[in-house]
Image (tube, helix red, strand yellow):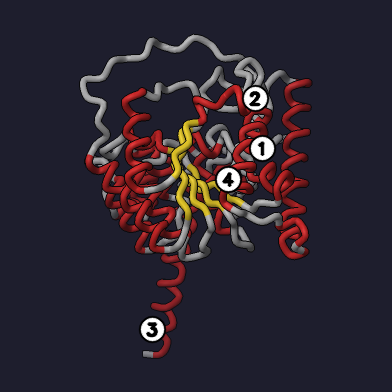
Amino acid sequence: MGRKRVVLALLTVVVIGSLAFLNSLLKPKYMGAIIEGALIAEYYEETTDHDVIFIGDCEVYENFSPITLWEEYGITSYIRGSAQQLIWQSYYLLEETLKYEKPKVVVFNVLAMKYDTPQKEAYNRMTLDGMRWSMSKARDIRASMTEEEQFIEYVFPLLRYHSRWSELTREDWKYLFHKDKVSHNGYYMRVDAKPMGTFPKEKKLGNYQFGSTAYEYLDKITNLCRENGIQLILIKAPSVYPSWYDQWDQQMEEYAKKNQIRYINFLNLQEEIGLDFETDTYDGGLHLNLSGAQKLSQYFGQTLRQEYGLSNHQTDSKLAQAWKPKVEFYYQMKAEQERDLEQYGYIRKFHEE
C-alpha cells in the first residue's frame, strides 16, 4: 500500500505540474504588440505604499506619469489601469488594493460611466487575468463576464486557451517563466508624437443618462473611499476623443456636488496645463505622449500638494531608495524609444535581437 500511495502522489504531482505548465504556456503573455494586458499584474511587485492610487482605463495609464509626480513633488503613486476598464472592474481593483495599502487619495477617471453592461472578453482578460486570486477577483469576474464567457475558464485558463497550440510564437516560450517590466508604476510610456487629426462628427444620443449599474458602482467607490478615510477625486482626462458630452459632464458635476467630492474635467483646462495637441499626443489626440503626460502630472501634482496636503517623501531614505531604480528605468526606456524613432521611425517592443 505504501508504494501505491507514493506512485499515486507522484502521478498527482506530474499531472498538476503538467497542467500548470500548459496553463502558463498557452495564456497570452502580453509582451509584444499588446502590452496593456501586462499592466495589472505588475502592481504586486511593489514594496512600498502610495499616497495616490489611480483607477480607470487608458485615460489614466497613458496620461499620468507617477515618476513625474515623484520627481516634482515627492508624491508616491500607482496607476491600476487597464484597457477599457469598466467601472465595476475599477471598484473591485480598488477593493483589492485596500487589502495591501491605504492611500490618502484615489483618482477615478469617469469615462467608464458610459458603459452599463459587460463589453468584450478580450478587454476583460486584460484586466482580470492579471489579478491575484481573491474574493474581489471572483466577484469582478462575475460582474464582467459576457454571455459567452464561463467562470470556470477564468479559474482554469487552459480551458479557454487550449486551441492556441497552433498560434504559439517565440514570445510564448521566451516569457513562459518570467515577464519583462513594461510600465512605470502603471504608466504606459510613448515618446513619439502624432498631431491631432480629424475625428468623426459627434453623434447625437437618444439618451444621455448614465446607467443604473454605472451609478451603483460609482456609489460603491465613493462609499469605499469614505469608509476608509480616503479622499476621492473624479476626473475626466484631457483626451479629445471619444466624445465626452456636456450632458455627461453635467451629471458628474451634480454627483460630485451631492456627494461632496471633487470632480476635475481636464478637457476644460488644456490651456492652463500647457497642452499642445500638435506635439503632446502620440495617436492624434486619443492619448497623451510622454511630453503631455508630464505636463498633466506637473499640473495635477500642484493640486495634490496644495489642496490635499500630500507630503514630499524625497527625504525619506527608504522611499528614495525604492524610487531610484524606478526613475532610472523610466529614463532608460525614454532613451531607448528616442533611439528607435531616430533609427527605425517607430518604437520597437522589447528590442528583440
The answer to which of marks 2 and 1 sits earlier in the sequence is 2
Name the residue carrying label 4: 186
User: In the picture, residue 66 is in which quadrant?
Assistant: top right
Q: Name the residue type under label 2.
A: Gly
Q: Give whichever of discs 4 and 1 has the lower sequence position.
A: 4
Mark toward the start of the polypeptide (3 vs 4): 3
Disc 1 marks a residue whose amino acid type is Gln
Q: Residue 26: x, y in percent? A: 46, 47
**Mark 1 sits on what residue?**
298
For the residues labelled 4 and 1, the Cα–Cα distance comes to: 17 Å
Picture layout, residue 334 above or below residue 126:
above
Residue for point 72% across, 44% down: 72
Residue for badge 3: 4
Q: Residues within 10 Å of mark 1 (few under 14, many from 20)?
A: many
Question: Which of the two discs, 3 and 2, labels the residue nearer the N terminus?
Answer: 3
CA separation in Å, label 3 and label 2: 73 Å
- Secondary structure of the residue carrying tag 4 is loop
Task: Identify residue for label 2.
Answer: 274
Residue 329, image quadrant: top right
**As drawn, which residue projects farthest toward the bottom?**
2
